[in-house]
Image (cartoon, rainbow, N blue to C red):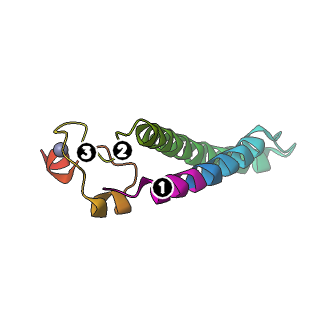
Amino acid sequence: MIDTVAIEAALQARLAELENHMARLQGDLRAPLDADYAEQANEIEDKDALAGIEGAHRAEAMQIRAALGRIAAGKYGICRICGCEIPERRLAALPTATLCIACVVN
Ligand SMILES: [Zn+2]
């Protein structure tokens, strides 16, 4: 049996961290551009990079919320394709995993 209590706590902590960082990124993304054109080019480049990070965070947060949902539903750690129990070692490395290794490879 998987210790979902510890995993849930870790996922919640990571989610809080992501939400915190996303809120800061959104603040930076909304900041008005500098009056200087050369400076604006740099800022736009920075904002593109920040938007990329924000997108990655958003995707990770979505996977974490889905994993928390599976924990709540008692379906955590069950492979989405074959229905087997995903080995604890795999979940420790990737707590949001929805597939066992065999199903990922196939
Ligand atoms: Zn499987």
Residue 37, horizontal then vertical, whole percent: 79, 44
Q: Is residue 15 left or right of residue 91?
A: right
Residue 47 lies, in percent from the top left, at 67, 45
Quadrant of the rendered image holding ligand 1: top left
Q: Which residue is mark 2?
A: 76
Disc 3 designates what residue? 99
Separation of marks 2 and 3 at Cα, in angstroms: 11 Å
Mark positioned earlier in the residue sequence (2 or 1): 1
**Given the image, on which type of amino acid does mark 1 rest?**
Val
Q: Mark 3: which amino acid?
A: Leu
Number of labels in the image equals 3
Whether the residue under disc 2 has CB within 8 Å of ligand 1: no
Q: Earlier in the sequence, mark 2 or mark 3?
A: 2
Magenta stretch contains residue 9: yes
In this rendering, does residue 46 appear at all? no
- 25 horizontally vs 82: left or right: right
Q: Would the CB of label 3 be found within 8 Å of ligand 1?
A: yes
Rendering quarter of residue 71: top left
Depth check, mark 2 against mark 1: the one in front is 1
SS label for mark 2: loop
Q: Position of residue 42 (x, y in %)?
A: 70, 51
Magenta part of the chain:
1-13
Find disc 1 in the rendering and name its residue: 5
Badge 2: how crowded within 10 Å, few (<14), some, or many (20+)? many
Q: Amino acid at mark 2?
A: Tyr
Give the residue displayed 64% in from the left and 50% down from the top. 16
Q: Residue at x 50, y 39 (%)?
A: 65
Check contact, mark 2 vs mark 3: CB within 8 A. Answer: no
Q: Image point 55% across, 46% down: which residue?
A: 57
Looking at the rendered image, the disc whose residue lies closer to the viewer, 1 or 3, is 1
